[in-house]
Each structure stands twice: as C-alpha cells, then as structure tokens.
Image (spheres, coloured by chain):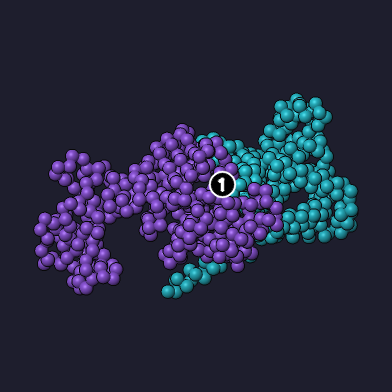
Chain colours: A cyan, B purple
Amino acid sequence: MAATARWRTARSAVLPIAAGLLVGLVLLALATLVIRAAESPDALVSAAVDPDVWYAIGTTFAAAGLAVAFLVLFGTPLAYLMARTRSRVLPLVEALIDLPLVLPHTIAGLLVYLVFMRNGPLGAPFGVVGLSFEDAFPGIVAAMLFVGIPYYVDAARDGFAKVPVELEEVARTLGAGPGAAFARVALPLAARECLSGAVTAWGRAVGEFAAVIMIAYYPLVISTLIYTRFTQYGLAGTVAVALVLLAVCGSVLIVLRRGAARLWRPDAPV
Amino acid sequence: MLRCEGCRVRAGAFVLELGRLHIQPGEHCLVVGPSGAGKSLLLRTVAGLVRPEAGTVLLRGEDALDLPPEARRIGLVFQHYSLFPHMSVHENVAFGLRMRGASRRHAREEATVELDRLGCAHLADRRPATLSGGEQQRVAIARALATGADLLLLDEPFAALDPATRAACRLELAGLRRSLDLTILEVTHALDEAGAHADRIVVLSGGRVVADGPYGTLAARPPDLRAARGLGLENLFPAVLIGHATGAWCFVPPGSVTVNLPTVAAPAGAFALAGMVEAVEDLGPLCRVRLLVDLPGEPVRLAGFAAAGAGALSPGFRATAHFPADAIRPLPD
C-alpha cells in the first residue's frame, strides 16, 4: 500500500515537471532576452521606432500572408483529394508533400532557387512577364510557400478526412453538385483544421530564414534582418530588435491561434 | 419505378451483379443479406453515387445510367442519418430545396411543412448533435422528402434505435408511404419486424441476388442455403437426404417443430430429435423453445414451439423435438 502511495505521489510530481520542462525552456529564453534588452532601454526605444525594423515586419507579414493565400488556394483541393482518394500513388504524394518537413531548409531554399532562378523551369517563364524571384519579394513568397506546404496540407487533409463521406453523398442526392457539396458541407466542417493549418503555416513562414536567404537575401525580412544585425553589430545590436520583432510576431500569432480556435466551431451544439 | 438489368458494379475487388431487379411504384422492397453482400453498394448504385461498369438502370422509365445523384429525385437516409452537423434542423431540411433553386423564404416554408408532417417542427432550431436517435431519424426522412423525392433509399435506418422507437418509426414510415405513395428500397442485415412491413424481400449474398419474393413465401421455402442464411432463418441442418441428389443441407420451418417432454411419444411418421433446452421465450399461449440437439459434430440448434404451461421445459432440461417428415425442405448449396 505504502509503495503504491509513493508511486502515485511520484507520478503526480513527475508529469507536471516533465510537462513544464519545455515550457520552462521557452520562458527562460524569453526572460533572458528581455533582461538583456532591458539593460539598454535606449536601444530598445530606437529599435521600436526603427523604420528598417517595421519595413522588415511589413515585408515578412505580407510575404507570409501571400504564401498562405496560395497555400489555401492550391492546398485545399489537394488536401481534399488526398483525404478522399484511395490510390496506390497516394503514399508517394504524401511523402512528397511532407518532404519539406525533413529537408534541411537550406536544401529547401536551394530547390526553390533552382526552380525560380532566372533560367529555372518556372523562373524563366515568369521572367518573360517581368516577374523576378532572385533577391525579390516574389522569391520570399516562393520560399515561404514551399516550406509551408506540409503544415497546411496535412492539417487540411486531416480535417477533410474526419468529415464522413456520407454527408457529401446525401448532399448530392439532395440536389447539390460536387462543387456545392464540397463548399456547403465538406469545407465548413473541415474549416477549423484548415484555419489551424493556415495559422501554423503562416507562423512557419514568418520564422523562415534558410530557405528565404537562398533565393532572396533582400528585401530583408525579420529573420534576415536579425541575422544582418547580428553579423554587423553583435549581440548588443540585436537583442533590442529581436525583442520588438518577437513581441509583434508573438502577439499576432496568439491572436490568430485564438481566433482559429474560437471563431469557428461549426458543429458545436446550439 | 426502378429497373436494373444486367448491372455489374465494381468496388475494389468486390463485384455486385444485379441480373434483374425491378421495383414497382409504391412498393416497399427490403434488401437483406450478410455483411459484405453488397447491400449498401446496391443503394449507392441506385443513388448514382457509383456507376455500373455494365448494364442499364432505368428510373421512372428513363435511362439513369449517366444521371448524376442530384438529378435523380431520390431520398437517401443512412444508418446514422448523416444530418449536417453545422446546420440547424431547419437548415438541414431546407438544404435540398435551396440546392434546387428555391428562395430562402420558400425553402423555409416548405421545410416547416415537412418538419410538421414528421412531428419535428419543435426541433427546427436545434442542432443535430442535441437530438435523440429517433428525432434524428425523423429529421433525416423529412430532409429526404422535402425535395419531392418519390423513391426513398434507406440504409439500415432503424439499426441504431431501441426496439420501441424502432417499432414506432416503422409504423410512421408505413403511414408516410401510404399517404405519399412512396417507393422504398431498404437495406437491412436483420429482418426482425421489417419483413412484416415490406412487400418484397431481395436476398443478396456474395454480390448476387439469390432470392426475391414475398417474405412469407421465402421464409417457408427458401430456394437455397445462401438465401436461407441471407434471410437469417433458423433450423438449417447439414444432412444427407435419401432421394435428393443435390443439397447437403435442409431446413425445417420452426412453425413445424413441436417441442415436448422426453416422455411424450412422437406422432406417427414424425421425426424425433432429443436435446437440451437452451432458451425458452414466453409468447403467451405458446413458448418458443431453442434446443441443443444431441448430434455428433458441430452443435446443431433447433427452434420450435411448445404449449405454454409445460413447466418442465426450462433451460438445462431435456426435451424432444417432433416434426413431420414433409416439413423437411432440402436446400441446394
């Protein structure tokens, strides 16, 4: 009995400690950054009003937003097909979609560069219509799009997979065409996962560095700005900028996540 | 109403072959058979969700082979009703009308009429997740009928209901069928009380129609072993009958079997099988008795009837089943 009680006590203590370790690590990193930044309040103020910082934030958010828009536009039909199709090539497609997850992001950037460089298979035709990707905003969008594919497509596919196919079949017999059955039944029921995937992909895009730098060092985004400041000015010239960027990005991500979790509960009982 | 001729439908490695299946207008046809017999595939074929690779499907006399589901004017109700969880009951019922171009106001009015017909008007603003099984079933039927469908396809619609609700829903469906002149094609894996409401039973086994006819006829004289098993009949025995070239199985209708105390002598010319009473079900003036028969090999169970008040017929006691020789029906494999 005593041994059982001791085991219960140990178990009840071990779980919170194990769970708290990772949270503690993140908190420790944030606290260290705040303390270092607070040592130089003037640098913090100047970073907060630095136009380069806000330009990088604007560029990052715009590129990440555009990348996620493309992901939603092209990734949603793909995710739906993956959830509904039973094909022998499906595992291959799934592996291709998840490839950016396991690739070092420098390689992901290299792949993006190879495709979108001036004489690349997509870079060349886009160049004809005046769209350049190297060291340009579209290059940042392409890199963010590439690394965000698995985050959005996997989440959306899981969302569609949990919608029983019978719901769409009933919708068809009630008069809905395939498009209407998708738009009125499958999409609303998978929307929560799609939104969640989009927010995660956006977060991943905002934080992307290696893939971006391979194709577009300029214009500077948040990650490349921090890298530049660090290589130019060292730690002292970086922590204040990092804290400002962290505060803005963290706030936006929290708002988006809470929004995705709260605003869309289509199957909640009334 | 529906004519399937020579239809062959493939779903992976499974093939459903419908040589000839005709459903008359106003008919209630019940499709029974074991799991994996192709019952649901048959419904999905009629609904237009699956296209046969061969054969013809005529709906209301017109070729429907290439008609998409939305153009077939049929209602489909699944076992778990498949109500749209993100819509209210009212929106569910109005969905089909809206898809067919009705204005929001007209769809709402028509949905209200349909809900009222099914006694569900008070549920209009509720979400499906808050409804009981019986309520969901009524709403699903209201939704299927709201678009003016005259052919209802039901995929085990009563399986998830308790017996009392199931019986009530069956009566309601029978009333709707009469008042709206509906044709019903219903799939079930257990006949239970469904047989009494249907005009016809189609037995599917291994993707083929193995029997087709009124329940009384099929239950009394199943054409073969697969049909008997598909109908869920009791009293199927492996046996070699002298004088019958085919069939190593036979069927004895439970109504022909009388269960007696072991001391009761068999009537002249009757067969007698002794065994142990397994279960006794009191039906009023009669008892339905299930006997584990003393035969070597696999356990053989025999269902029959005994007069009520035969106190000694209790589980665990010995008894003897008597049945006339002409009650034994040989079953071809």
Residue A76, given in percent of the width and then of the height, sits at 66, 44
The chain holding disc 1 is: B
Label 1: which secondary element: loop
Q: In the rendered image, is residue B41 in sight?
A: no
Residue to which mark 1 is pinned:
B73
A240 displayed left or right of B86: right
Q: In the rendered image, is residue A68 in sight?
A: yes
Residue A173, given in percent of the width and then of the height, sits at 57, 47
Where A126 sits versus A28, above or below? above
Q: Quadrant of the C terminus of chain B?
A: top left
Residue A54, given in percent of the width and then of the height, sits at 85, 49
Q: How many dots with numbers? A: 1
Q: Residue at 21% across / 59% down in the picture?
A: B257
Residue A14, given in percent of the width and then of the height, sits at 55, 65
Q: Which of the two residues, A160 or B126, is positioned nearer the viewer here? A: B126
Q: Residue at 42% across / 35% down in the picture?
A: B6
Q: Residues within 10 Å of mark 1 (few under 14, many from 20)?
A: many
Amino acid on which the number 1 mark rests in the picture: Arg
Q: Which of the two residues, B143 or A258, is positioned nearer the viewer here? A: B143
Q: Which of the two residues, B265 or A212, is positioned nearer the viewer here? A: B265
Q: Residue at 81% across / 32% down in the picture?
A: A131
Where A171 sits versus A85, above or below? below
Q: Tell me where residue B282 sits by quadrant.
A: bottom left
